């Protein structure tokens, strides 16, 4: 059975933790590295089976479509509440008065200009599915978009700017460790509403969709292939119970990204030290194949 590994740290650590728990129960799994936009077809076809972090802000559309069509299965919701959006370190506020209100960006886009942005502001996104271009257009922002190739790329740019006190506007999310090391805030765009993404006449722009921010209190779900439930019912049940809170996720990502610990070691240590938590995720219907924990 195949666990999808994406390209941000907490997802990778959680994938390894789940694999470790499976192993204790005699369930063999392997990882497949996939970008978010390729995982949907894989999960729908049963070429991959497990996704441990589906974020509402960036992935709700696909998740809801595929689960409602019966091509992929939802496997429960984490306790963690999520937010993913444009973000800046706090010192930027002085250079762009009015932040965190998004309207401030209309007046100070040039503060965020770089040598390659042609005088416009630069927003640094990630490789995840954000309709950022649509939002920039709908809100009439004078910004260009650049994309880092993974979370490391975002944090390297943030660190560089931070050390020189330079303005930067980039994609960030919570739970994450960034908020513990770099003080900052999300831009407050018009409040999210599902209509914002389907009805052009909704909101600030009467002409364009995506004139709003992402949900502030978003969900974090898990997904599986249909095959998983049919062929590995115990693995599916464990996945449904697999459940993390904000602080746990932030801490695991912090250990890897900031303390530079090895992902597999961080995961193995969590499994070793948190038996009390994960043993509750094993339903009695699961055969205790792995023997001792
Ligand atoms: C999916 N992500 C947490 C990177 O926004």
Image: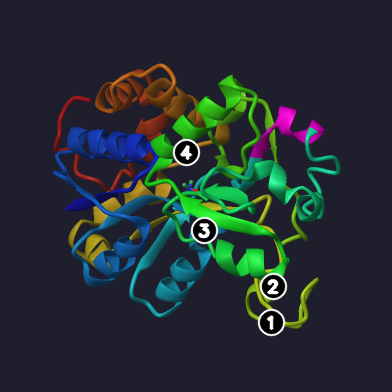
Cβ of mark 3 under 8 A from ligand 1: yes
Q: In the rendered view, tell whether residue 267 sits above or below residue 207.
A: above
**What percent of the width, then of the height, locates residue 288?**
19, 38
Q: Secondary structure at mark 4?
A: helix
The image quadrant that residue 75 belongs to is bottom left
The image quadrant that residue 194 belongs to is bottom right
Residues under numbered marks 1 and 2 in contact, where contact means CB atoms less than 8 Å apart: yes
**Residue at point 37%, 66% (across, down):** 73
Q: Is residue 232 magenta?
A: no
Q: Secondary structure at mark 1?
A: loop
**What percent of the width, then of the height, locates residue 60?**
52, 64
Q: Secondary structure at mark 3?
A: helix
Q: CA distance from mark 4 to mark 2?
A: 27 Å
Residue stretch rendered in magenta on the structure: 88-94
Q: Nearer the viewer, residue 179 or 240?
A: 179
User: Circle 4 is placed at which residue position?
Assistant: 154
Residue 121 circle label: none
Q: Nearer the viewer, residue 11 or 146?
A: 146
Q: In the rendered view, tell whether residue 138 sits above or below residue 263.
A: below
User: Circle 2 is placed at which residue position?
Assistant: 196
Q: Residue furthest right?
A: 98
User: Circle 3 is placed at which residue position?
Assistant: 58
Q: Residues within 10 Å of mark 2 (few under 14, many from 20)?
A: many
**Residue at point 41%, 21% (across, down):** 255
């Amino acid at each position: 059975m195949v666990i999808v590994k994406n390209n941000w740290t907490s997802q990778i650590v959680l994938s390894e933790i789940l694999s470790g728990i499976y192993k204790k129960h005699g369930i063999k799994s392997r990882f497949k590295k996939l970008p978010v936009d390729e995982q949907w077809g894989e999960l729908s076809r049963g070429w991959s089976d497990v996704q441990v972090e589906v974020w509402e802000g960036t992935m709700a559309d696909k998740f809801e479509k595929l689960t409602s069509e019966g091509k992929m299965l939802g496997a429960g919701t984490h306790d963690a509440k999520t937010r993913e959006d444009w973000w800046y370190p706090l010192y930027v506020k002085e250079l762009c008065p009015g932040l965190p209100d998004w309207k401030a960006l209309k007046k100070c886009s040039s503060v965020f200009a770089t040598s390659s942005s042609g005088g416009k502001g630069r927003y640094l996104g990630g490789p995840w599915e954000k309709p950022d271009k649509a939002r920039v257009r709908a809100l009439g922002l004078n910004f260009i978009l650049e994309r880092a190739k993974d979370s490391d790329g975002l944090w390297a740019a943030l660190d560089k700017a931070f050390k020189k006190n330079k303005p930067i506007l980039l994609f960030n999310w919570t739970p994450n460790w960034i908020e513990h090391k770099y003080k900052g805030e999300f831009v407050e765009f018009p409040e999210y509403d599902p209509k914002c993404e389907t009805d052009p006449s909704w909101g600030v722009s009467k002409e364009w969709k995506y004139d709003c921010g992402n949900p502030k209190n978003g969900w974090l779900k898990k997904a599986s292939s249909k095959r998983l439930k049919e062929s590995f019912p115990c693995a599916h049940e464990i996945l449904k119970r697999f459940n993390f809170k904000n602080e746990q996720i932030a801490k695991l990502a912090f250990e890897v990204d900031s303390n530079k610990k090895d992902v597999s070691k961080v995961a193995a240590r969590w499994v070793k030290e948190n038996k009390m938590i994960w043993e509750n995720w094993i339903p009695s219907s699961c055969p205790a194949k792995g023997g001792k924990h």
